[in-house]
Amino acid sequence: MAITPSRRPTYYEELKAKGYSRRDFMKFCAMMGAYLGLEASGIAQVANALETTPRIPVIWLHFQECTCCSESFIRSSHPIVADILLDKISLDYTETLMAASGHRAEAAMHKTMQDYNGEYILCVEGSVPTADDGVYCCIGGRTAEQVLEETAAGAKAIIAWGSCACNGCVQAAKPNPTSATPVHKLVKGKPIVKVPGCPPIGEVMAGVIVHILSFGRLPALDRIGRPKAFYSKRVHDTCYRRPFYDAGLFVESFDDANAKKGYCLYKVGCKGPMTYNACGVTKWNNGTSFPIQSGHGCFGCSEENFWDNGPLYRQMANFPGFGIESNADTIGMVAAGVTAAGIAAHAIATNFRKAKVIDEHIEEGKEAEKEL
Amino acid sequence: MASSIASPKKLRRVFVWELPVRIYHWLNALAIVALIATGYLIGNPPALLSASEASERFFFGWIKFIHFAAAYIFFFNFIFRIYWSFAGNKYAHWRNFLPISKQFFKDMWAVIRIDILLKKDTEHVAVGHNALAGFFYFLTFLAFILQSITGFALYANMSDWWFADLFSRAGWLFWNEEFAMRNWHHATMWFFIIFAMVHIYLVFYHDYVEGRGEISSMGGGWKFMEEEFFEKKEEKETKAK
């Protein structure tokens, strides 16, 4: 492998150095092409890009998060994902996986920021606390907000990994004590790809990166910034239990016979009908399963503010301001009952208060009737 | 036999609700009943006991289909009604619904006094919509708009038609939370249920107390006004001259 000091190795060169065969490489390209929904010729494009383009430097920041996004990523089904895209080769800075620590790590990050100004990809995992001057998340003596501002300035694009970076996830749920803020609300003027999920699917994360590598631009995004390839369909639309939904066959409780038969989990709170993600197609853990397949409804982890939108095990949310256990229907029924009582009272009162005019009409009508 | 009524009232036929208004009314009523029935079931599916395979049934699919089909009828019917509020007669005119004059508020107060608080001292006669009813119809129009926007926004993903997609941006109104949008769509249903209860009661009330054919007016379009009502109006007009 002839690498001149001025030239960074390409992904393929790194792979060969790692001992992967050409066959492994092509398998990886085919797999990624399939996930991205490319036609057959697109696979050659992916392969060509990985062969010829030097790796893109990546800075991967961790703020208010649980690292489940990183965990999901390194468990992506093809080993090349973890080995090449994520390993020391690609990542110039990531708190969880880098070898360096302390000042050296900070120095490495700054070197990348200087050497590749305007070229590097900034990946953000976690939300940024803005309350109390950001004291709730400090790295190397600086707040998350400062770190983000600094690194975002020279980034080519930003990938917001997971629901934390996309919408704040659990730490932004009411009352959001640290004012956990998603990336897009803090960084303006940079292209941001949102890859929500708690965590996002590893293959989806790999797919987003491979797309950027292969085509040199961001994947097509929907109106709130998610890659269309993975977030344009609801979990409901790709769910293998959908026929039970359409048939009206539902699990009533988790221990009933319907649950055993694999009926639809809608009535025990499945949020698949409101959740945009690729779980039903790509699945998890090397395509083994996904929540609904294991008998638990989707709780919409890739949706905005899913923690505050009602109980996980019920279809309808609690109605704001009326305490727990009261959804729109319980309140509606009470309101309808009160209305019915009001109507009954008014009808009775009418017969007393308007008796004179009603009697007149009746008399008048009776007179006319006699003349016929 | 001597009549206990000094002078029996003579009634004159007045054409109030034109055919398009009546068709609109009943299409709207049918669509709303279908939407409420299916919408309630979508939020609270019944527990079915069935041994049949899912492939043999399409119960919930039909419920949803009826909901979506009724939604289209409801929406375009409403658009037609907006057109007719410019093209129709004076009882169909948009001025009946928007409280934009002092007189409108005075009339609303009169209706509240006479029909809600059941005061006996005066009578307030309205040939078409009374002011309070008109204002409540205006509120239902707002609910129509809210339901149409949230409904089609939820539906947009299931449709290839650009029309439904027009509404997909409405998610923004609900902080991009489709859960929240869905819950508000469901909660607003109760406004329609309660409106229908009060509306039907008041139609019976007016027919019973006033005897001018309130109930049948939405069938044939006629209401029956006393001769003296016309005379009084003429008197007023000659005085004004």
Image (cartoon, coloured by chain):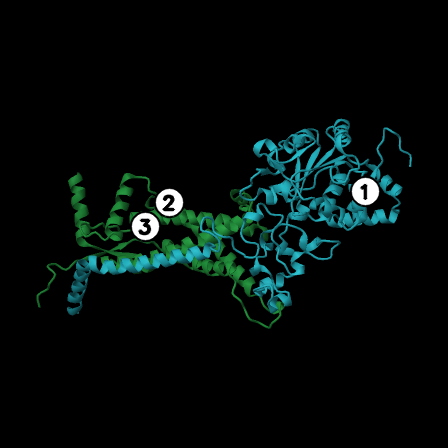
In this rendering, which labeled residue sits more in front, label 2 or label 3?
A: 3
Q: Chain of mark 2?
A: B
Query: Relative to residue A142, is residue A246 depicted above or below?
Result: below
Residue type pointed to by label 1 = Ile
A65 to the left or right of B167: right
In this rendering, which labeled residue sits more in front, label 1 or label 3?
A: 1
Q: Which shade of the palette goes to chain A?
A: cyan
CB atoms of marks 2 and 1 within 8 Å: no
Quadrant housing residue A143: top right
Q: Are marks 2 and 3 on the same chain?
A: yes
In this rendering, which labeled residue sits more in front, label 2 or label 1?
A: 1
Residue A93 placement (x, y as % from top left): 75, 35
**How many angstroms separate mark 2 from mark 3 (CA)?**
19 Å
**How many angstroms separate mark 2 from mark 1 (CA)?**
67 Å
- Residue under numbered circle 3: B133
A100 to the left or right of B74: right
Q: Residue at x 84, y 33 (%)?
A: A8
